Image: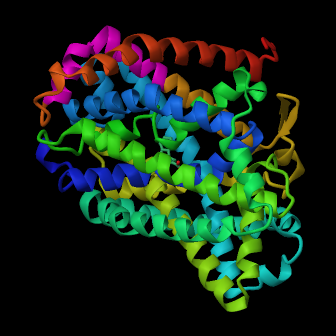
Protein backbone atom coordinates (compact mmCIF):
# COMPACT_ATOMS: atom_id res chain seq x y z
CA UNK A 1 0.00 0.00 0.00
CA UNK A 2 2.83 2.33 0.92
CA UNK A 3 4.15 2.49 -2.60
CA UNK A 4 0.82 3.61 -3.99
CA UNK A 5 0.87 6.85 -2.06
CA UNK A 6 2.09 10.01 -3.72
CA UNK A 7 5.52 11.49 -3.11
CA UNK A 8 7.19 14.80 -3.40
CA UNK A 9 10.09 14.78 -5.81
CA UNK A 10 12.54 15.89 -3.15
CA UNK A 11 13.19 18.58 -0.62
CA UNK A 12 12.54 21.41 -3.01
CA UNK A 13 9.20 19.92 -3.95
CA UNK A 14 8.19 19.54 -0.35
CA UNK A 15 9.41 22.98 0.59
CA UNK A 16 7.57 24.53 -2.33
CA UNK A 17 4.35 22.76 -1.43
CA UNK A 18 4.60 23.43 2.30
CA UNK A 19 5.52 27.06 1.72
CA UNK A 20 2.67 27.24 -0.77
CA UNK A 21 0.37 25.95 1.93
CA UNK A 22 1.70 28.41 4.46
CA UNK A 23 1.73 31.50 2.27
CA UNK A 24 -1.78 32.53 1.43
CA UNK A 25 -4.62 34.77 2.45
CA UNK A 26 -3.34 34.38 5.98
CA UNK A 27 -0.29 36.44 5.12
CA UNK A 28 -1.69 39.05 2.81
CA UNK A 29 -5.30 39.42 3.89
CA UNK A 30 -5.41 38.32 7.52
CA UNK A 31 -2.01 39.30 8.89
CA UNK A 32 -2.30 43.04 8.06
CA UNK A 33 -5.78 43.42 9.51
CA UNK A 34 -4.92 41.44 12.65
CA UNK A 35 -1.85 43.62 13.07
CA UNK A 36 -3.92 46.73 12.50
CA UNK A 37 -6.58 45.68 15.00
CA UNK A 38 -4.02 44.71 17.61
CA UNK A 39 -1.91 47.82 17.76
CA UNK A 40 0.74 47.41 15.07
CA UNK A 41 4.40 46.83 15.87
CA UNK A 42 3.91 45.17 19.26
CA UNK A 43 1.68 42.60 17.60
CA UNK A 44 4.24 42.03 14.87
CA UNK A 45 6.91 41.37 17.47
CA UNK A 46 4.79 38.94 19.51
CA UNK A 47 3.75 37.17 16.34
CA UNK A 48 7.40 36.72 15.35
CA UNK A 49 8.29 35.37 18.78
CA UNK A 50 5.36 32.94 18.73
CA UNK A 51 6.39 31.78 15.27
CA UNK A 52 9.93 31.01 16.30
CA UNK A 53 9.55 29.57 19.78
CA UNK A 54 6.29 27.67 19.25
CA UNK A 55 5.44 27.57 15.54
CA UNK A 56 8.69 26.18 14.21
CA UNK A 57 9.00 23.40 16.83
CA UNK A 58 5.36 22.38 16.34
CA UNK A 59 5.93 22.36 12.60
CA UNK A 60 8.91 20.03 13.05
CA UNK A 61 6.76 17.83 15.25
CA UNK A 62 4.01 17.59 12.65
CA UNK A 63 6.36 16.84 9.78
CA UNK A 64 8.22 14.23 11.83
CA UNK A 65 5.00 12.49 12.83
CA UNK A 66 3.83 12.43 9.21
CA UNK A 67 7.06 11.20 7.73
CA UNK A 68 7.45 8.53 10.37
CA UNK A 69 3.99 7.08 9.93
CA UNK A 70 3.56 7.68 6.19
CA UNK A 71 -0.15 8.07 6.82
CA UNK A 72 -2.89 10.69 6.82
CA UNK A 73 -3.52 12.81 9.94
CA UNK A 74 -5.89 10.36 11.61
CA UNK A 75 -3.82 7.32 10.65
CA UNK A 76 -0.63 8.94 11.95
CA UNK A 77 -2.00 9.57 15.43
CA UNK A 78 -3.54 6.11 15.50
CA UNK A 79 -0.45 4.32 14.25
CA UNK A 80 2.09 6.03 16.43
CA UNK A 81 -0.36 6.28 19.33
CA UNK A 82 -3.68 4.48 19.48
CA UNK A 83 -7.32 4.82 18.48
CA UNK A 84 -8.00 7.50 21.09
CA UNK A 85 -5.14 9.62 19.85
CA UNK A 86 -6.60 9.09 16.42
CA UNK A 87 -9.44 11.37 17.55
CA UNK A 88 -6.98 14.26 17.64
CA UNK A 89 -6.22 13.61 13.99
CA UNK A 90 -9.92 13.32 13.24
CA UNK A 91 -10.57 16.63 14.96
CA UNK A 92 -7.86 18.20 12.79
CA UNK A 93 -9.50 16.85 9.66
CA UNK A 94 -12.80 18.44 10.69
CA UNK A 95 -11.03 21.73 11.42
CA UNK A 96 -9.54 21.59 7.94
CA UNK A 97 -12.94 21.15 6.32
CA UNK A 98 -14.41 24.04 8.30
CA UNK A 99 -11.45 26.35 7.64
CA UNK A 100 -11.61 25.59 3.94
CA UNK A 101 -15.34 26.38 3.91
CA UNK A 102 -14.76 30.04 4.77
CA UNK A 103 -11.26 30.38 3.34
CA UNK A 104 -12.71 29.54 -0.03
CA UNK A 105 -15.20 32.38 0.32
CA UNK A 106 -12.45 34.93 0.95
CA UNK A 107 -10.44 33.44 -1.91
CA UNK A 108 -13.56 34.04 -4.00
CA UNK A 109 -13.42 37.74 -3.05
CA UNK A 110 -9.81 37.94 -4.22
CA UNK A 111 -10.75 36.18 -7.43
CA UNK A 112 -13.70 38.50 -7.93
CA UNK A 113 -11.44 41.52 -7.40
CA UNK A 114 -9.07 40.21 -10.04
CA UNK A 115 -11.91 39.91 -12.54
CA UNK A 116 -13.47 43.26 -11.62
CA UNK A 117 -10.20 45.13 -11.87
CA UNK A 118 -9.11 43.67 -15.16
CA UNK A 119 -12.36 43.17 -17.04
CA UNK A 120 -14.74 45.48 -15.28
CA UNK A 121 -14.79 48.91 -13.76
CA UNK A 122 -13.67 48.40 -10.18
CA UNK A 123 -11.13 51.20 -10.37
CA UNK A 124 -13.74 53.52 -11.87
CA UNK A 125 -16.85 52.57 -9.90
CA UNK A 126 -15.07 52.37 -6.60
CA UNK A 127 -13.18 55.61 -7.12
CA UNK A 128 -13.01 57.70 -4.00
CA UNK A 129 -14.72 55.12 -1.82
CA UNK A 130 -13.32 51.65 -2.02
CA UNK A 131 -14.77 50.95 1.40
CA UNK A 132 -18.31 51.20 0.06
CA UNK A 133 -17.34 49.24 -2.99
CA UNK A 134 -16.00 46.42 -0.86
CA UNK A 135 -19.04 46.34 1.41
CA UNK A 136 -21.48 46.11 -1.42
CA UNK A 137 -19.26 43.69 -3.30
CA UNK A 138 -19.13 41.12 -0.49
CA UNK A 139 -22.83 41.55 0.22
CA UNK A 140 -23.68 40.36 -3.28
CA UNK A 141 -24.69 36.75 -3.07
CA UNK A 142 -24.22 35.85 -6.72
CA UNK A 143 -20.71 37.24 -6.98
CA UNK A 144 -19.76 35.30 -3.89
CA UNK A 145 -21.40 32.16 -5.13
CA UNK A 146 -19.89 32.16 -8.58
CA UNK A 147 -16.35 33.09 -7.63
CA UNK A 148 -16.10 30.73 -4.68
CA UNK A 149 -17.53 28.00 -6.85
CA UNK A 150 -14.89 28.55 -9.49
CA UNK A 151 -12.24 28.58 -6.81
CA UNK A 152 -13.41 25.31 -5.31
CA UNK A 153 -13.43 23.68 -8.72
CA UNK A 154 -9.87 24.84 -9.44
CA UNK A 155 -8.76 23.51 -6.06
CA UNK A 156 -10.39 20.17 -6.76
CA UNK A 157 -8.73 19.82 -10.14
CA UNK A 158 -5.27 20.43 -8.76
CA UNK A 159 -5.80 18.04 -5.86
CA UNK A 160 -6.99 15.33 -8.26
CA UNK A 161 -3.79 15.56 -10.21
CA UNK A 162 -2.06 14.48 -7.04
CA UNK A 163 1.04 15.32 -5.18
CA UNK A 164 3.78 15.85 -7.66
CA UNK A 165 2.04 17.02 -10.78
CA UNK A 166 -0.53 19.20 -9.12
CA UNK A 167 0.57 20.57 -5.83
CA UNK A 168 4.29 20.89 -6.43
CA UNK A 169 4.26 22.47 -9.83
CA UNK A 170 1.71 25.08 -8.93
CA UNK A 171 3.76 26.17 -5.92
CA UNK A 172 7.20 26.23 -7.50
CA UNK A 173 6.32 28.67 -10.22
CA UNK A 174 4.02 31.05 -8.43
CA UNK A 175 5.66 31.70 -5.10
CA UNK A 176 8.66 33.61 -6.46
CA UNK A 177 6.40 35.82 -8.58
CA UNK A 178 4.49 36.86 -5.51
CA UNK A 179 7.66 38.14 -3.87
CA UNK A 180 8.51 40.21 -6.90
CA UNK A 181 5.17 41.96 -7.12
CA UNK A 182 5.04 42.63 -3.39
CA UNK A 183 8.43 44.27 -3.37
CA UNK A 184 7.61 46.38 -6.41
CA UNK A 185 4.45 47.65 -4.78
CA UNK A 186 6.22 48.39 -1.50
CA UNK A 187 8.79 50.55 -3.25
CA UNK A 188 5.93 52.48 -4.78
CA UNK A 189 3.92 52.72 -1.54
CA UNK A 190 6.83 54.08 0.46
CA UNK A 191 7.06 57.12 -1.76
CA UNK A 192 3.53 58.27 -0.92
CA UNK A 193 2.73 61.17 1.41
CA UNK A 194 2.46 60.15 5.02
CA UNK A 195 3.75 56.67 4.23
CA UNK A 196 6.24 56.98 7.07
CA UNK A 197 3.42 57.23 9.61
CA UNK A 198 2.40 53.78 8.48
CA UNK A 199 5.94 52.48 8.77
CA UNK A 200 6.12 53.83 12.32
CA UNK A 201 2.84 52.21 13.29
CA UNK A 202 4.13 48.95 11.88
CA UNK A 203 7.66 48.97 13.22
CA UNK A 204 7.77 51.02 16.45
CA UNK A 205 6.15 48.97 19.21
CA UNK A 206 3.77 50.47 21.73
CA UNK A 207 3.52 47.90 24.47
CA UNK A 208 0.73 49.66 26.31
CA UNK A 209 -1.62 48.17 23.74
CA UNK A 210 -0.62 44.60 24.58
CA UNK A 211 -2.92 42.35 26.61
CA UNK A 212 -3.85 38.68 26.76
CA UNK A 213 -5.98 38.88 23.69
CA UNK A 214 -3.12 40.42 21.67
CA UNK A 215 -1.00 37.44 22.58
CA UNK A 216 -3.79 35.08 21.73
CA UNK A 217 -4.41 36.66 18.36
CA UNK A 218 -0.70 36.60 17.57
CA UNK A 219 -0.46 32.93 18.46
CA UNK A 220 -3.58 32.10 16.47
CA UNK A 221 -2.22 34.05 13.52
CA UNK A 222 1.13 32.24 13.71
CA UNK A 223 -0.61 28.84 13.65
CA UNK A 224 -2.98 29.78 10.88
CA UNK A 225 -0.27 31.29 8.77
CA UNK A 226 2.12 28.35 9.14
CA UNK A 227 -0.75 25.89 8.44
CA UNK A 228 -0.25 24.21 11.81
CA UNK A 229 -2.52 22.47 14.25
CA UNK A 230 -4.76 20.37 12.02
CA UNK A 231 -2.49 17.87 10.37
CA UNK A 232 -1.80 19.61 7.06
CA UNK A 233 1.91 19.21 7.63
CA UNK A 234 1.48 15.69 8.97
CA UNK A 235 -0.13 14.90 5.65
CA UNK A 236 2.51 16.67 3.58
CA UNK A 237 5.26 15.13 5.73
CA UNK A 238 3.88 11.70 4.94
CA UNK A 239 4.73 12.25 1.28
CA UNK A 240 8.39 12.83 2.09
CA UNK A 241 11.29 10.47 1.66
CA UNK A 242 13.57 9.54 4.52
CA UNK A 243 16.61 11.33 3.17
CA UNK A 244 15.28 14.83 3.52
CA UNK A 245 16.63 17.19 6.16
CA UNK A 246 13.44 18.18 7.94
CA UNK A 247 14.90 20.98 10.01
CA UNK A 248 16.15 22.81 6.97
CA UNK A 249 12.86 22.32 5.20
CA UNK A 250 10.85 23.65 8.14
CA UNK A 251 13.18 26.61 8.56
CA UNK A 252 12.84 27.60 4.92
CA UNK A 253 9.05 27.28 5.02
CA UNK A 254 8.86 29.42 8.15
CA UNK A 255 11.14 32.03 6.68
CA UNK A 256 9.14 32.22 3.46
CA UNK A 257 5.91 32.54 5.41
CA UNK A 258 7.16 35.23 7.76
CA UNK A 259 8.74 37.20 4.92
CA UNK A 260 5.56 37.38 2.90
CA UNK A 261 3.53 38.44 5.94
CA UNK A 262 6.11 41.03 6.86
CA UNK A 263 6.17 42.44 3.33
CA UNK A 264 2.37 42.52 3.18
CA UNK A 265 2.37 44.70 6.30
CA UNK A 266 5.07 46.91 4.89
CA UNK A 267 2.87 47.45 1.86
CA UNK A 268 -0.49 47.90 3.54
CA UNK A 269 0.27 50.25 6.45
CA UNK A 270 1.97 52.98 4.43
CA UNK A 271 -1.03 52.86 2.10
CA UNK A 272 -3.56 52.94 4.91
CA UNK A 273 -1.90 55.94 6.55
CA UNK A 274 -1.26 57.82 3.35
CA UNK A 275 -4.95 57.47 2.51
CA UNK A 276 -5.99 58.58 5.97
CA UNK A 277 -7.78 55.28 6.71
CA UNK A 278 -8.01 53.46 10.01
CA UNK A 279 -5.67 50.48 10.48
CA UNK A 280 -8.40 48.87 12.59
CA UNK A 281 -10.79 48.43 9.67
CA UNK A 282 -10.83 44.63 9.95
CA UNK A 283 -11.21 42.04 7.18
CA UNK A 284 -11.80 44.61 4.46
CA UNK A 285 -8.43 46.29 5.04
CA UNK A 286 -6.48 44.93 2.08
CA UNK A 287 -9.42 45.14 -0.29
CA UNK A 288 -9.96 48.78 0.59
CA UNK A 289 -6.37 50.03 0.87
CA UNK A 290 -4.94 48.55 -2.31
CA UNK A 291 -7.23 49.71 -5.11
CA UNK A 292 -6.27 53.33 -4.50
CA UNK A 293 -2.69 52.81 -5.63
CA UNK A 294 -3.83 50.85 -8.63
CA UNK A 295 -6.12 53.72 -9.49
CA UNK A 296 -3.29 56.22 -9.17
CA UNK A 297 -1.25 54.23 -11.67
CA UNK A 298 -3.70 55.17 -14.40
CA UNK A 299 -6.32 53.06 -16.19
CA UNK A 300 -3.96 50.80 -18.09
CA UNK A 301 -1.15 50.31 -15.58
CA UNK A 302 -3.70 50.05 -12.78
CA UNK A 303 -5.38 47.17 -14.54
CA UNK A 304 -2.11 45.44 -15.25
CA UNK A 305 -0.51 45.83 -11.83
CA UNK A 306 -3.74 45.53 -9.84
CA UNK A 307 -4.81 42.55 -11.91
CA UNK A 308 -1.44 40.85 -11.42
CA UNK A 309 -1.56 41.46 -7.70
CA UNK A 310 -4.96 39.91 -7.18
CA UNK A 311 -4.16 37.10 -9.54
CA UNK A 312 -1.06 36.23 -7.53
CA UNK A 313 -3.06 36.50 -4.33
CA UNK A 314 -5.44 33.96 -5.84
CA UNK A 315 -2.58 31.63 -6.63
CA UNK A 316 -1.21 31.99 -3.12
CA UNK A 317 -4.68 31.16 -1.83
CA UNK A 318 -4.92 28.23 -4.21
CA UNK A 319 -1.74 26.57 -2.96
CA UNK A 320 -3.31 26.90 0.51
CA UNK A 321 -6.76 25.60 -0.36
CA UNK A 322 -5.19 22.55 -1.97
CA UNK A 323 -3.36 21.76 1.26
CA UNK A 324 -6.56 22.17 3.24
CA UNK A 325 -8.45 19.86 0.91
CA UNK A 326 -5.61 17.33 0.79
CA UNK A 327 -5.99 16.56 4.51
CA UNK A 328 -9.49 15.00 4.39
CA UNK A 329 -8.73 13.56 0.95
CA UNK A 330 -5.66 11.76 2.31
CA UNK A 331 -7.76 10.43 5.17
CA UNK A 332 -10.45 8.94 2.93
CA UNK A 333 -7.94 7.57 0.44
CA UNK A 334 -5.61 6.05 3.05
CA UNK A 335 -8.13 4.81 5.59
CA UNK A 336 -11.22 4.09 3.57
CA UNK A 337 -9.41 3.05 0.40
CA UNK A 338 -11.67 5.20 -1.74
CA UNK A 339 -10.76 6.51 -5.18
CA UNK A 340 -8.98 9.85 -5.11
CA UNK A 341 -11.11 11.41 -7.82
CA UNK A 342 -14.43 10.54 -6.20
CA UNK A 343 -13.24 11.67 -2.81
CA UNK A 344 -12.02 15.00 -4.11
CA UNK A 345 -15.27 15.88 -5.85
CA UNK A 346 -17.38 14.66 -2.95
CA UNK A 347 -15.44 16.69 -0.42
CA UNK A 348 -15.27 19.77 -2.60
CA UNK A 349 -19.05 19.71 -2.92
CA UNK A 350 -19.48 19.20 0.82
CA UNK A 351 -17.13 22.04 1.70
CA UNK A 352 -18.86 24.34 -0.75
CA UNK A 353 -22.24 23.66 0.83
CA UNK A 354 -20.86 24.17 4.35
CA UNK A 355 -19.48 27.48 3.07
CA UNK A 356 -22.86 28.81 1.91
CA UNK A 357 -23.79 30.52 5.19
CA UNK A 358 -20.32 32.14 5.22
CA UNK A 359 -20.99 33.47 1.73
CA UNK A 360 -24.20 35.01 2.96
CA UNK A 361 -22.66 36.48 6.06
CA UNK A 362 -20.96 39.61 4.73
CA UNK A 363 -24.15 41.58 4.36
CA UNK A 364 -26.28 39.42 2.09
CA UNK A 365 -28.44 37.93 4.86
CA UNK A 366 -28.81 39.73 8.16
CA UNK A 367 -29.23 36.56 10.19
CA UNK A 368 -25.80 35.31 9.14
CA UNK A 369 -24.21 38.75 9.10
CA UNK A 370 -25.05 39.42 12.75
CA UNK A 371 -24.94 35.80 13.75
CA UNK A 372 -23.62 36.10 17.30
CA UNK A 373 -22.41 38.70 19.72
CA UNK A 374 -19.27 38.28 21.83
CA UNK A 375 -16.05 40.10 22.62
CA UNK A 376 -18.18 43.23 22.48
CA UNK A 377 -18.82 42.84 18.76
CA UNK A 378 -21.38 41.45 16.39
CA UNK A 379 -19.88 38.46 14.69
CA UNK A 380 -20.86 37.11 11.32
CA UNK A 381 -21.19 33.42 10.61
CA UNK A 382 -17.82 33.59 8.85
CA UNK A 383 -16.26 35.24 11.93
CA UNK A 384 -17.65 32.58 14.23
CA UNK A 385 -16.40 29.70 12.11
CA UNK A 386 -13.04 31.42 11.76
CA UNK A 387 -12.74 32.03 15.52
CA UNK A 388 -13.81 28.52 16.42
CA UNK A 389 -11.75 26.55 13.96
CA UNK A 390 -8.90 28.72 12.81
CA UNK A 391 -8.01 30.18 16.19
CA UNK A 392 -9.32 28.01 19.00
CA UNK A 393 -9.22 24.78 16.98
CA UNK A 394 -5.67 25.17 15.71
CA UNK A 395 -4.25 26.17 19.07
CA UNK A 396 -5.99 23.17 20.60
CA UNK A 397 -4.61 20.93 17.84
CA UNK A 398 -1.10 22.25 18.44
CA UNK A 399 -1.49 21.72 22.17
CA UNK A 400 -2.57 18.10 21.64
CA UNK A 401 0.35 17.51 19.27
CA UNK A 402 2.83 18.61 21.92
CA UNK A 403 1.15 16.32 24.49
CA UNK A 404 1.18 13.48 22.00
CA UNK A 405 4.89 13.83 21.36
CA UNK A 406 5.74 14.36 25.03
CA UNK A 407 3.70 11.57 26.59
CA UNK A 408 2.92 9.06 23.89
CA UNK A 409 5.27 9.07 20.95
CA UNK A 410 8.19 10.52 22.98
CA UNK A 411 10.74 13.12 21.97
CA UNK A 412 13.39 10.43 21.59
CA UNK A 413 11.56 9.06 18.61
CA UNK A 414 10.98 12.50 17.22
CA UNK A 415 14.71 13.21 17.48
CA UNK A 416 15.42 9.94 15.72
CA UNK A 417 13.07 10.86 12.90
CA UNK A 418 14.54 14.34 12.59
CA UNK A 419 18.03 12.84 12.45
CA UNK A 420 17.23 10.92 9.27
CA UNK A 421 18.76 13.02 6.56
CA UNK A 422 20.35 15.24 9.23
CA UNK A 423 22.89 13.11 11.13
CA UNK A 424 24.22 15.93 13.31
CA UNK A 425 20.78 16.83 14.66
CA UNK A 426 20.71 14.59 17.74
CA UNK A 427 23.84 16.20 19.13
CA UNK A 428 23.03 19.77 18.24
CA UNK A 429 21.77 22.51 20.49
CA UNK A 430 18.81 22.85 18.16
CA UNK A 431 17.57 19.48 19.31
CA UNK A 432 17.61 20.57 22.95
CA UNK A 433 15.79 23.78 22.11
CA UNK A 434 13.17 22.01 20.01
CA UNK A 435 12.58 19.41 22.71
CA UNK A 436 12.33 22.05 25.41
CA UNK A 437 9.72 23.85 23.37
CA UNK A 438 7.72 20.71 22.59
CA UNK A 439 7.72 19.32 26.13
CA UNK A 440 7.56 22.46 28.28
CA UNK A 441 7.18 25.83 26.66
CA UNK A 442 4.62 25.13 23.95
CA UNK A 443 2.23 22.93 25.94
CA UNK A 444 2.14 25.46 28.77
CA UNK A 445 1.60 28.49 26.59
CA UNK A 446 -0.79 26.77 24.19
CA UNK A 447 -2.75 25.15 27.00
CA UNK A 448 -3.11 28.30 29.08
CA UNK A 449 -4.02 30.44 26.12
CA UNK A 450 -6.52 27.89 24.88
CA UNK A 451 -8.35 27.86 28.20
CA UNK A 452 -8.31 31.64 28.58
CA UNK A 453 -9.66 32.18 25.11
CA UNK A 454 -12.47 29.69 25.39
CA UNK A 455 -13.54 31.28 28.66
CA UNK A 456 -13.24 34.77 27.28
CA UNK A 457 -14.74 34.30 23.87
CA UNK A 458 -17.51 31.86 24.49
CA UNK A 459 -18.36 32.10 28.17
CA UNK A 460 -17.95 35.83 28.57
CA UNK A 461 -15.53 35.43 31.48
CA UNK A 462 -13.20 38.37 31.32
CA UNK A 463 -9.94 37.65 33.01
CA UNK A 464 -8.08 40.75 31.92
N1 LIG B 1 -1.60 29.01 5.96
C1 LIG B 1 -2.58 29.40 4.99
C2 LIG B 1 -2.60 30.90 4.91
O1 LIG B 1 -1.87 31.55 5.58
C3 LIG B 1 -3.93 28.82 5.30
C4 LIG B 1 -3.87 27.36 5.47
C5 LIG B 1 -3.58 26.44 4.53
C6 LIG B 1 -4.01 26.65 6.67
N2 LIG B 1 -3.56 25.19 5.09
C7 LIG B 1 -3.81 25.32 6.40
C8 LIG B 1 -4.28 27.07 7.95
C9 LIG B 1 -3.87 24.37 7.41
C10 LIG B 1 -4.34 26.14 8.95
C11 LIG B 1 -4.12 24.80 8.69
O2 LIG B 1 -3.34 31.46 4.16
Q: Is residue 310 above or below residue 116?
A: above
Indicate whether residue 301 is drawn in magenta: no
Q: Is residue 333 above or below residue 121?
A: above
Magenta span dominant secondary structure? helix
Report the label total. 0
327 and 417: which one is in front? Answer: 417
Residue drawn at the location 28% of the way across and 16% of the way down: 432
Indicate whether residue 405 is drawn in magenta: yes
Residue drawn at the location 63% of the way across and 46% of the way down: 31
Is 70 displayed left or right of 24 in the figure?
left
| Chosen colour scheme | rainbow
In which image quadrant can residue 243 be found?
top left
Instruction: Where is residue 97? Give x, y as percent.
Output: 52, 43
Is 40 displayed left or right of 309 in the figure?
right
Residue 33 in view: no
Point out the image quarter for the C terminus: top right
84 and 452: which one is in front? Answer: 452
Instruction: Where is residue 115? Give x, y as percent.
Output: 65, 79
Furthest toward the bottom, the residue is: 300
Magenta stretch? Answer: 398-419
Amino acid sequence: MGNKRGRFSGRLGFVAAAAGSAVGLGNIWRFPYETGENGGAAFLLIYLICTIIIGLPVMLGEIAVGRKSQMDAYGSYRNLGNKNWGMVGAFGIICGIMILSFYNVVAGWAFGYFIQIVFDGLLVEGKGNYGNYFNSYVADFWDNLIFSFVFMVLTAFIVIRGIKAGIETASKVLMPLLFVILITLIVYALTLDNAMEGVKFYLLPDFSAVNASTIYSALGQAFFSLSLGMGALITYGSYLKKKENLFKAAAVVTLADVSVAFLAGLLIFPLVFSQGQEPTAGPGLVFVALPTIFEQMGPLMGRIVGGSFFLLLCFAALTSTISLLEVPVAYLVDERKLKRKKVVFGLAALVFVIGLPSMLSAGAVDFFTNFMHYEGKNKSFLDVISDLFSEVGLVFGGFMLTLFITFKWKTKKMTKELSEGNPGYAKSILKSLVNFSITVLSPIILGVIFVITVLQKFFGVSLF
